[in-house]
Amino acid sequence: MILKIEFENFFSIRDQVRIDFRAANINTMLARELGHNVIDWNGVPVLKSVGLFGPNASGKSNILKAINFCCRMILDSHLNNEGAVFNYEPFKFDGWQDKSSKFLIDFVCDNVEYEYSFELAKNKIISESLYHYPVGRRAKVFVRNADGKYSFGTGVINKPMDVVLNTSDKNLFLSRASSMNREIAQKLYRYFMNQFLLGLVNVNEMMVLDSFNTYKKVILKALEICDTDITDIEARKEQVPAPVAIPGQGELTFQLIDVLKFKTFHRYKKDVMFDLDLEESNGTRKLFQILIRLLDVVKNRKGIMMDEFDMGLHTRLADFILDLIHASEGSQLLFSSHNTNLIDVKRLRRDQIVFVNKTEDGATEVYSLYDFKDFRENMDAEKGYIQGRFDAVPYVDSSVDSIKQLLEE
């Protein structure tokens, strides 16, 4: 599970931003009623979900991009060669584009806590470190300093200097160590590959078939709970032409590739088939796509992040998706949303409701409803948000007179 994630100097994020899944000490009646929103890990309460709320262009998507960038660096940086430039932009105002960017992720793998961090510029890794808590006390796995020197914990990594010799300033040591079959690095690599998922999948890819077959009955039950009249779904492999670029040839050629197509059947006429892609509503298609991914997350205690996960969904369906996470034993969801109905202390704890705002100097700031000590749980959080009490709401001068003036210019 994820405990906390920190990053700074990434797109609109200038100062350090922290997304904290460690639950705050809230001992109110409402918090106790929302006990299913929290995981108990060795006596530490950890949140199952955190929601990001705020106006457009405040930085919600950049927070998710930063986490995605951090994870992709872990998974892919061993492939970087000389001349590689990392695919991100630092904060562009006040000289920050010349400063380094920093990332830290604190997480639990195989019931052991790990704290991993790295610092980089656009064209090189500056520093990197990994610590773990094997017996509850912080211990070093490795540290890579800005001067290129390494130090290692005793007996944790086999032949670490062999990995160092194969690690350039374009590669994370953790990524390289995994590619060189070092046990602890491979374990953490598998965690970021399989346990912390970075969004939804294309349901037309053949890789989805195993998940569909595994969870078909649960998906149909979920669709029934969500008041669709779909009674059955079939998966079929079809071949479709796809463009292929051939080096040295200016024109595209086409070849047949296998894709997955889903056919639905409805309560009224169970023998009439519908094409999910062409004949079902946007909301139904989106819900199906989420369920394919989310049921794997829920069943196998994984984590996932989703940007505007409820776009195109009825608010009751958004509630259902959160209920899936909160009903699980140990899954986690980080999401962004413009659905103010979710800003409800009867559904989410105050520390689960996180506001994202952009300051006058263009920087993203993050704070939770829990940070407002004068907010009482008998108040209407959604109403307060819309009224601008927590700042993270767009100011739009949309009066008829102001719009008339705009059209007259």
Image (cartoon, grey):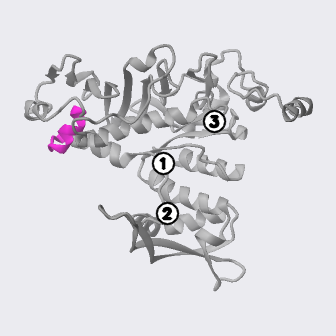
Give the amino acid type for the residue marked by disc 1 in the picture: Gly
- For the residue pair 205 and 270, the one nearer the viewer reads as 205
Q: Name the residue under label 2.
A: 203
Q: Nearer the viewer, residue 134 or 20?
A: 20
- Residue 177 inside the magenta-drawn segment: yes
Q: What element carries label 3?
A: loop
Residue 234 is left or right of residue 133, and the answer is right
Element marked by disc 2: loop
Secondary structure at badge 1 equals: loop
Q: Residue 199 carries which label?
A: 1
Residue type at tag 2: Val
Q: Give the class, few, some or many, for how many residues have Cα within 10 Å of label 2's Cα (few <14, many ≥20).
A: many
The magenta stretch is 172-184
Crowd around label 1: few <14 · some 14–19 · many ≥20 (10 Å): some
**Residue type at tag 3:** Leu
Is residue 288 placed above or below 20 in the rendered structure? below
Q: Label 3: which residue?
A: 348
Quarter of the picture holding the N terminus: top left
* Residue 1 in view of the camera: no
Vertical position of residue 98 compared to residue 253: above or below: above
Whole-percent x, y for residue 20 in the image = 49, 27
Main secondary structure of the magenta stretch: helix
